[in-house]
Image: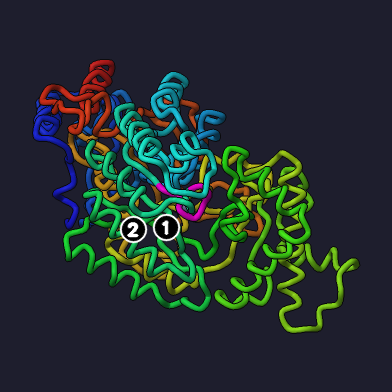
C-alpha cells in the first residue's frame, strides 16, 4: 500500500499511454471468449498483499484478460488449478546474469523457483554495452523477462582503469555520459559495488553525481554498500546521503550485517532506514533468505592490495603477493582487521564455492585447507595462530588462483561466507520495506559448490519463512517477491494478477513447495512451482521446462529518450509502452 504511488512512474505522458493500453485490454476482455488459456479453480494470491480468494483467470494475447468466475467460458486450453495458489511470477531484482543468461537463456534454475522476471547489472557490475546486451537477449529469446541496471565499476574501469584516486573533471564527465547512454539504451537504473575495486576508490560525491543521472531518467540507484560489516551504520548513512544529494530512489541491496560483533543490530539498521523514509528519502531494501553470503576471495584483502591502475587488480595483486614484505603487510593488516575488528579466530566460516583452477578445493573451508597443508606450518599453539595460518593459506590460494588465469575475481576463487545471524535475516525479511532477491544467477546443475540461493530462494521463503516460521502471511511473502519489486523498479504491468497486466503467473501448493538446494548439496532445483507462464506462454509444466522463450526486455524509463539535462523533454509516445503495444499487436 505504501508503494501505490510508485506503480506507474515517469511523466504524465507515459501514464496516459499506459492507461490507454490498460483500457484497451479491458475493452478487449469484453469481447466474447475464447481465451488462449483459462485457469480455473485457483486460490488467487494477486501480489498486492491482500487476502487470497477463489477464482478463475482468463488469458488472451499474453495478458490477463479477465479474473472472476469464468467457468463455462471457451478457451483454447483450460487448466484446473485444483485449489492451488495462483500468484504472479516472482520478480527478482538482484541477479548477476551478464554471461550466464546469454549462455543459458532457458534459465531453468530460476523458472523452477518461480521466477519470471529478473534485473541484472547489480553490485556495480553490468555489461558495458547495455543496448547491445539487451538486444542480444531479445534476439536469442529468453524464458524470463529481463532488464538491467548499469554498473559504476563498469563505467569507472572503462574510464579510469583500476586507479585509486578521485576522477578528474573530465573523467567524471565521461562517466556521466556513459550513465546517460546506458539509461537511454534501456537501463532501469544505476548500481554500485563499493566493496569491490574500483568502487572502493570512489568517494560519495562521485557516486552521487552518477546516480543523479540515472534519477533524471526516472531510474533507481541500487547499492552494494561500502561495508556490511563493522562499518555498516556508516555505510547506511553514506547511501542515504548519496540518494538525498542525487535525488534518486535508493535500493540497498542484500541488506545485512556480517560482523559477529554487530549481530543483532538489524533492528537499529531498519530503524535508521525508516527514519530516512520519514525524512523524505525514498529507500527500500532487498534480502536473500540465507545466513551466508557469496563473493570473491579477494574481499578479505585490504583495498590497497587490489589497486591496479591500467594494469588491473589481478596482476597488481599477484605482484604484491610475490613480494615478501608486501605480502607480510597484507597478512598483518588482514589479521588486525579479522581478529581485532571482526572478532574472528579462524577462517572456518569461509568455504570455497568455485575454484575452476583447482576443483579439489571446492566445498572446503579455508580452515580445512589450512589444516590439510599443516605439514609445512608451525604448530598452532599461540593464541591467534589458527587465524594467522588461515590467512597464509588464503594468500596461497589467492596467489595460485590469480596466477592460473581462470576463475572469477582477482583470486580466481568464489567463496561462501557463513557470516550472518538468523535473527537478523528474519527481522530484515519481515520488514514491509524488504523485497526478496537472490543475488545469484543462471546456474547449471553441476560445477562447483555454488550458494544454494541461485536455486532455492523463492521456495525457501515460502517453505521456511512462511510455512515453518510464520514470519509473514503467505500473501505478504508473495508481495515481497512480486508487486513490491516490480513497482520499485518500474516494471510496467507486472507483479500483480490484474486485468490488463502481463500474464506472468505460477501455480503452486504452499504445503508442497520446498527448496531442495543446500550448502552441502546445492545442485537441486526447487520443488513445487510446476506450472509457470511468462507473458501468457507456459515455460514450465509438470515440473519440466517447455523450452519456450517468451521473455521480453524490461526497458527502463529513459529508453530512447533524451535526458532533461540535454534540454529535451519528451511528451510523445514513449518506448516502454510502445514496446508493449507492438508486442500485444503481435499477439492479436
Ligand atoms: Zn552485491
Magenta run includes residue 485 = no
Is tag 1's residue or tag 2's residue first in the polypeptide sequence?
A: 1
- Badge 1 crowding class, 10 Å Cα cut-off, few under 14, some 14 to 19, many 20 or more, is many
Residue 462 picture quarter: bottom left
Whether residue 485 is situated above or below residue 405 in the rendered picture: below
For label 1, the SS is loop
Magenta run includes residue 196 = yes
Q: Mark 1 points at which residue?
A: 225
Residue 63 picture quarter: top left
Residue at the location (32% across, 38% down)?
188
Q: Mark 2 points at which residue?
A: 239
584 with respect to 533 (left or right): left
Check the image and name the residue furthest to the right: 375
Q: Can residue 286 be seen in this view?
A: yes
Residue 205 drawn at (x, y percent): 33, 51
Q: In which quarter of the image is the N terminus?
A: bottom left
Magenta residues, as a range?
192-198
Amino acid at each position: 500500500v505504501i508503494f501505490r504511488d510508485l506503480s506507474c512512474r515517469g511523466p504524465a505522458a507515459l501514464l496516459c499511454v499506459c492507461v490507454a493500453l490498460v483500457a484497451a485490454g479491458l475493452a478487449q476482455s469484453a469481447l466474447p471468449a475464447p481465451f488462449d488459456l483459462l485457469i480455473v479453480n485457483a486460490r488467487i494470491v494477486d501480489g498486492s498483499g491482500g487476502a487470497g480468494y477463489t477464482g478463475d483467470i482468463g488469458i488472451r494475447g499474453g495478458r490477463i484478460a479477465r479474473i472472476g468466475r469464468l467457468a463455462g467460458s471457451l478457451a483454447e486450453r483450460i487448466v484446473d488449478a485444483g485449489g492451488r495458489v495462483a500468484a504472479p511470477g516472482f520478480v527478482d531484482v538482484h541477479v548477476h546474469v551478464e554471461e550466464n543468461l546469454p549462455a543459458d537463456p532457458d534459465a531453468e534454475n530460476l523458472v523452477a523457483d518461480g521466477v519470471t522476471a529478473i534485473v541484472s547489472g547489480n553490485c556495480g557490475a553490468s555489461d558495458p554495452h547495455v543496448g547491445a546486451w539487451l538486444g542480444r537477449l531479445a534476439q536469442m529469446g529468453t524464458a524470463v523477462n529481463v532488464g538491467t541496471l548499469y554498473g559504476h565499476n563498469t563505467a569507472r574501469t572503462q574510464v579510469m582503469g583500476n586507479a585509486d584516486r578521485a576522477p578528474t573533471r573530465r573523467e567524471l564527465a565521461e562517466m556521466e555520459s556513459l550513465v546517460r547512454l546506458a539509461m537511454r539504451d534501456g537501463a532501469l537504473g544505476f548500481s554500485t559495488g563499493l566493496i569491490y575495486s574500483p568502487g572502493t576508490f570512489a568517494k560519495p560525491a562521485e557516486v552521487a553525481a552518477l546516480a543523479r543521472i540515472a534519477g533524471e531518467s526516472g531510474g533507481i540507484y541500487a547499492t552494494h554498500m561500502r561495508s556490511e560489516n563493522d562499518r555498516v551504520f556508516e555505510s547506511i548513512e553514506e547511501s542515504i546521503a548519496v540518494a538525498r544529494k542525487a535525488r534518486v530512489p535508493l535500493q540497498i541491496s542484500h541488506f545485512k550485517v556480517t560482523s559477529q560483533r554487530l549481530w543483532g543490530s538489524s533492528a537499529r539498521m531498519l530503524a535508521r532506514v525508516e527514519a530516512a523514509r520519514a525524512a523524505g528519502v525514498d529507500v527500500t531494501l532487498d534480502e536473500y533468505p540465507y545466513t551466508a553470503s557469496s563473493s570473491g576471495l579477494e574481499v578479505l584483502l585490504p583495498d590497497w592490495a587490489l589497486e591496479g591502475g591500467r594494469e588491473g587488480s589481478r596482476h597488481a595483486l599477484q605482484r604484491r603477493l610475490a613480494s615478501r614484505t608486501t605480502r607480510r603487510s597484507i597478512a598483518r593488516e588482514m589479521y588486525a582487521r579479522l581478529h581485532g575488528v571482526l572478532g574472528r579466530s579462524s577462517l572456518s566460516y569461509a568455504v570455497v564455492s568455485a575454484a575452476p583452477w583447482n576443483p579439489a578445493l571446492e566445498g572446503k573451508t579455508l580452515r580445512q585447507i589450512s589444516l590439510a597443508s599443516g605439514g609445512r606450518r608451525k604448530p598452532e599453539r599461540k593464541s591467534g595462530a589458527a587465524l594467522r595460518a588461515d590467512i597464509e593459506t588464503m594468500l596461497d590460494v589467492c596467489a595460485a588462483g590469480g596466477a592460473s588465469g581462470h576463475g572469477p575475481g582477482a583470486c580466481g576463487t568464489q567463496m561462501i561466507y557463513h557470516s550472518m545471524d538468523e535473527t537478523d535475516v528474519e527481522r530484515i525479511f519481515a520488514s514491509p520495506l524488504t523485497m526478496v532477491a537472490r543475488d545469484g544467477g543462471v546456474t547449471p546443475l553441476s560445477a562447483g559448490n555454488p550458494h544454494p540461493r541461485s536455486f532455492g530462494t523463492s521456495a525457501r521463503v515460502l517453505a521456511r519463512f512462511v510455512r515453518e516460521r510464520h514470519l509473514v502471511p503467505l500473501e505478504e511473502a508473495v508481495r515481497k517477491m512480486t508487486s513490491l519489486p516490480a513497482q520499485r523498479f518500474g516494471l510496467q504491468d507486472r507483479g500483480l494478477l490484474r486485468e490488463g497486466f502481463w500474464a506472468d503467473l505460477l501455480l503452486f501448493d504452499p504445503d508442497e513447495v520446498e527448496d531442495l538446494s543446500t550448502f552441502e548439496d546445492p545442485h537441486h532445483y526447487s520443488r513445487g512451482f510446476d506450472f509457470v507462464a511468462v507473458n501468457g506462454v507456459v515455460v514450465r509444466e509438470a515440473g519440466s521446462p517447455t523450452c519456450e522463450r517468451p521473455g521480453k526486455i524490461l526497458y527502463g524509463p529513459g529508453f530512447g529518450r533524451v535526458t532533461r539535462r540535454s534540454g529535451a523533454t519528451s511528451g510523445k509516445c514513449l518506448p516502454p509502452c510502445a514496446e508493449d503495444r507492438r508486442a500485444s499487436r503481435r499477439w492479436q
